[in-house]
Amino acid sequence: SSRAISSHLISSHQIMEREEKVTWAETQSEPSGAPAARPARTSLSKYKSIRHQVSLSEHRFDTRTLPADLQRVYGHLEEKFGEQYALTFVFTVRTASELHRAWHMTLLTSKILQQIKDKFKMRMTWELGVIKLKFRVEDGGYELHRKVPYDYDSEFQDLYMKIAVALVEGRIDIHQALNFQSQTKHGKHTAASGLFLRDFPGRLVLYPFQAATCAVIFFAGDWYDAGIAALCGLVAGCVEYALSTIGGDAKTLIDVLVGTSTGAVAGLFYRYDGERTCLPAIFLGTLYWFFYGTAFVIGILEIIAGELETGVVRFMAVSVKTFVLSLGTTFGMRIVLDDSMSAWLDQKNNCGQIDLDDQWWRIPLYLACSASALGQYRLPIVHYWRGLIVQLAGYEVQYQAAKYFAKSDISNLGVASSNVLGCMAAVLVAVLLSNIIDKISYYYNARLLQRNLEPFSPFGEFMYNLSAWWVRVSNAIGLGRKTDLTFLDMEESLRTQSRELNDPNHPRQQITLKKEEEEILLEAIVGAEGLNIWSLLMPTVYQLVPGSLIAKLWFNAVFPPPLIDSDPIPLPDGSTITTKIPDSAAEAVFSNLMVIATSLALGLILGLGLVQVLNWIFHRILRKCMMNRRTSSQQSMMNRQDDRQTLLTADADDDPDTMHETVELPEEIKDIGTSGGGGGEAAAGKLDLVDKNSSSSDGQVSDAK
């Protein structure tokens, strides 16, 4: 029983760290290029995982596939500092670009870039804006600019993060990492079901589904409105498909033409079907796909975190682009309706016909709507259950808290509190779920990758069998990746060859795989990295954010809310009069928007802060009662993982205090200094940096430069 308990407590990070230490020591003892000595019989205290036993063929990354400007910079860096340094710069640029394209927050992308920079001693900086990215290397000696519009892509958000982590932790080399990035870009590591929803025309099935469910669950529509919203969603999807296919300047017309088509189709139903259509529900449900509410919240989060320029630009861009959608919708109404304003204001009789509190199908309908959002975010279908759990937790806590506060608090404080609690709940559930998934996956990966030779406990065997069963079932129903099933089937063969290789009496000298099998092995190694919780959190934030409120703000600008009667005013003669005054509730859209968006951003921060507090309690108190201890390298690896997931840890200042510091220069720069014939401390590789504000430092700073 003690062995079972210890087997359950040892984490995958500890096993992989032990594996790395053994491999590093053994590789250092052998000269480069020397034939590997026959391994001794493997013991439980010293062993190699399968990736160290397999003789992988060398597949060098083809730099000719890079863009022309990146090729030029690569050539200069390769000539001066070597291939490894140059390829790492290429990898960093590609990682930042693809994570940005997949809608990974700039704050989090900077963290993984910083880890790559620290690991490989890169001398580079970057600026990650809303659309434009800038990369500088060698103190600005070379600078690259990229214009990368972002899209929703949870799968790539997770995969590109895992590739970078695998490189930083030394589980793949730079050529393997770059080749894996190229394969990922071309969909080689995406299931066939995911490829269907990843791009048009298969993606068209999501538009009407999301429009119909959103019209009912969020915007007070009924099932009749849901049907019209589904038709409008299909038309909007076809418009985006057509303009995206044309490409170029045509893509800039997507927002205005989508809005126009939605206003025209819904307006026709309103005009010719008895004026019983809830236009706001149809408009907001259809345009939900195109709203930028998530970006609005992220912009506020960036402002709070100190990224003022990026946050403010994103904030303004979201507002303007949503106004284009709203104005386009009013153009469509004007085309088909004689009195657009009356149709928009005709909400009292047509909207809010269903009381969701009394409907048993409220949660199933929300889950259906959330599934469409996960499809929009391109999350692998086999992982939908993960996203739905996090989304449901955030939604239900927000919904129930809002009902509770509404009973006693009519101010916006109750709304803000419910949003904070909902977002915090989503963060906690996402972190807990990712930890559970990592624990379950540990046994599966440990056996298939041969990271642990110790027999599993009954609990471990159950977890392995559960994971293997899920791989087989997901492939049987056509949703999983075939490569996962292939690698599972390779397990027995690899284990047999490994036993033969480690048997001194067996003639086997190496384990060799076909090219396809090598790629599957690398896919398994990368996939074994920890889950990126933000690939689950971003779709959840998407479901909680107030994108529709931004649209309502602009609709109110086009169709001003009607004046309402004031309270009766008594006159001296005993009579009363009433006056027309603005409807403060209808005009308070912007204040509601700011309350909701800011409270959601604070909910993310507070949720992550609570996770850090719980981690501190767990590691500092509970770990003292356990036998296993982490080494310093294991703790560093865990710290890097925590840093990648949170927004609260601060990076090093860009303006450090340089008074009387001694800086060790890299070997490459030392060589450059000595080859130029210079002497003194600069040639020896050290510079004494003096505060430039000091009155006696002018000459010394000039010499240092």
Image (cartoon, helix red, strand yellow):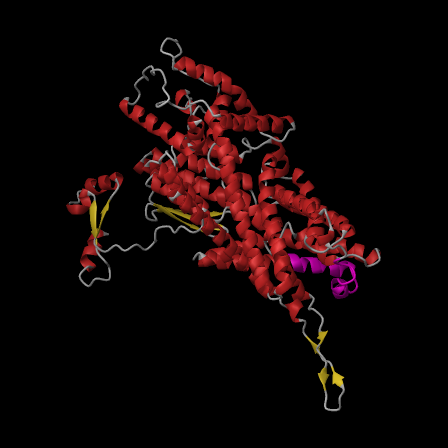
Q: Position of residue 198 (x, y in %)?
A: 61, 38
What range of the chain is rendered magenta? Answer: 325-352
Return the residue found at the far left.
680
Return the residue found at the far front.
1
Q: Is residue 41 above or below residue 347?
A: above
Q: Position of residue 54 (x, y in %)?
A: 42, 20
| The N terminus - image quarter | top left
Viewer can see residue 69: no
Give the left or right position of residue 33, taking residue 224 as reference: left
Q: Is residue 305 magenta?
A: no
Viewer can see residue 142: yes
Which residue is at a point 73% across and 52% down the rendered structure image?
A: 358
Q: Quadrant of residue 85?
A: top left
Give the left or right position of residue 118, taking residue 612 as reference: left
Q: Is residue 427 above or below residue 64?
A: below
Q: Position of residue 407 (x, y in %)?
A: 64, 62
